[in-house]
Image (cartoon, helix red, strand yellow):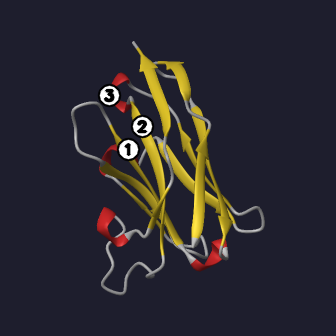
Amino acid sequence: QVQLVESGGGLVQAGGSLRLSCAASGRTFSSYDMGWFRQAPGKEREFVAAISRSGVKTYYANFGKARFTISRDNAKNTMYLQTNSLKPEDTAVYYCAAAATAFGYGSQPSNENEYDYWGQGTQVTVSS
């Protein structure tokens, strides 16, 4: 089992940046593919980005390809999401998640059902 704790959220003006972190404890962090999801008020949770356990492969939702960067540091048991050029529509609770099954072996990184563990979320609010 792995425990996940997000941090780095906050209030930022449109056009600003935030770096979200997801700290993992418990089982070996490098044994999991990881992902970021978000949920805005009144909306379903949606995929943001994902990264393979080695960090070599990354995946992005279309809205994040040009503005967000996912990365991980297995030595620090931490995953990151650098968010730039933030827009009011990026306002949401951002969650990190861990998947034991490797992406690409019938497992889709954008499918939240593929993930086994979730953090509690961190709020990102972008003002116009």
Horizontal and vertical percent position of residue 121: 48, 43
Residue at image position (45%, 62%) is: 50
Residue at image position (76%, 61%) is: 76
Tag 3, which secondary structure? helix
For residue 91, above or below residue 82 = above
Marks 1/2 in contact by CB < 8 Å: the verdict is yes
Residue under circle 1?
A: 38
Given the current orientation, which residue lies at the most extreme bottom position?
105
Measure the C-alpha gap from mark 1 to mark 3: 11 Å
Measure the C-alpha gap from mark 2 to mark 3: 12 Å
Marks 2/3 in contact by CB < 8 Å: the verdict is no
Marks 1/3 in contact by CB < 8 Å: the verdict is no
Label 2 Cα neighbours within 10 Å, binned few <14 / some 14-19 / many ≥20: some
Q: How many marks?
A: 3
**Sooner in the amino-acid sequence: mark 1 or mark 2:** 1
Viewer-side residue, 108 vs 99: 99
Q: Quadrant of the C terminus?
A: top left
Residue under circle 2?
A: 93
Residue at image position (33%, 79%) is: 107
Label 1 or label 3, whichever lies nearer to me, is: 1
For residue 11, above or below residue 101 = above
**Sooner in the amino-acid sequence: mark 1 or mark 3:** 1
Tag 2, which secondary structure? strand
Decide if residue 63 is on the left or right side of residue 59.
left
Q: Amino acid at mark 3?
A: Glu
Quadrant of the image occupied by residue 102: bottom left
Q: Amino acid at mark 2?
A: Val
Measure the C-alpha gap from mark 1 to mark 2: 5 Å
Label 2 or label 3, whichever lies nearer to me, is: 2
Horizontal and vertical percent position of residue 98: 49, 66
Residue under circle 3?
A: 89
Q: Amino acid at mark 1?
A: Arg
